[in-house]
Image (spheres, grey):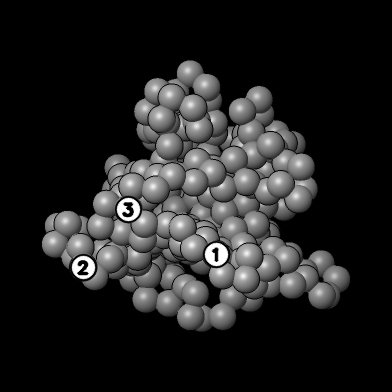
Amino acid sequence: MNKQNGLEKRLKGGQRYIIKDEESGSKAIMPIMVDNGYEVEVIKVDGGILKNTKENERACDYMLVSKKEEKNAKVVSERNLSKVVCMIELKGTNREKEISHAYDQISQTIDRLPEKYINNQEYLVATIAGAQDKTLPSMITKEKRELCKKLSVKCKNKVKNIEKLVFYIQPNIRTKKACVNKKKKPFVIECHSKNGAYIPVPELLLEMIEL
């Protein structure tokens, strides 16, 4: 794993990493494991590549960019995917007002980012990651619907159900293997940094979209 100016971490296939916000003290986490044949960049957005200098200017916490490794192109040739981007907001709270703010933070980030970060991706998705002791509320709001539309426009591949482009991450210590909970809306990826229940990226993100 390499660091570049403290804003970006690069991971290779098989490597594990826990995305968290130590500066804010939030307990929200997103544990990931990079799939073979891919490399992943974890980019700090808020206070990193984007600075909030104007009133009411917002940005999400991180951005995850999954790219196909050229030398391992045959490993992932079945999907023929070269780039999947995931916007990440860490929320260690179950308050609906804060979740609504998260939609706005992600939406503004997409508008403000230089095009080089989110161009030519097969899929652009967004997640709100929670903490182990916080259950994120099910919210079907105007803000969420508008965010789903914005994400779908940026996707090179057509998505049948655009609501799947926004989902939750819910750490649960009972989870033995990261999985998608389809009974909840938005869909929830259940995971944990213990017991090896890391989220395989981008495989599980793609599985969720294609369910």
Labels 2 and 3 touching (C-beta < 8 A): no
Residue under the point 20% across and 63% down: 72
Seen as rendered, the residue at the extreme front is 2
Q: Quadrant of the C terminus?
A: top left
Mark number, residue 145: none
Residue under the point 54% across and 44% down: 18
Residue assigned mark 3: 13
Residue 192 in view: yes
Instruction: Choose between 51 and 189: the one closer to the eye.
Output: 51
| Horizontal arrangement in the rendering, residue 123 relative to residue 106 (left or right) | left
Q: CA distance from mark 3 to mark 1?
A: 16 Å
Image location of residue 7, percent across then percent down: 61, 66
Q: Is residue 28 above or below residue 13?
A: above
Q: CA distance from mark 2 to mark 3?
A: 12 Å
Residue 110 in view: no
Q: Secondary structure at mark 3?
A: loop
Q: Is residue 7 above or below residue 206?
A: below
Residue assigned mark 2: 71
Q: Secondary structure at mark 1?
A: strand
Q: CA distance from mark 2 to mark 1?
A: 22 Å
Image location of residue 143, percent across then percent down: 63, 55
Labels 3 and 1 touching (C-beta < 8 A): no
Which one is earlier in the sequence, the residue at label 2 or at label 1?
A: 1
Which one is earlier in the sequence, the residue at label 3 or at label 1?
A: 1
Which one is earlier in the sequence, the residue at label 2 or at label 3?
A: 3
Seen as rendered, the residue at the extreme right is 55
Amino acid on which disc 2 is placed: Lys
Amino acid on which disc 1 is placed: Lys
| Horizontal arrangement in the rendering, residue 21 relative to residue 14 (left or right) | right
| Horizontal arrangement in the rendering, residue 70 relative to residue 193 (left or right) | left
Mark number, residue 3: 1
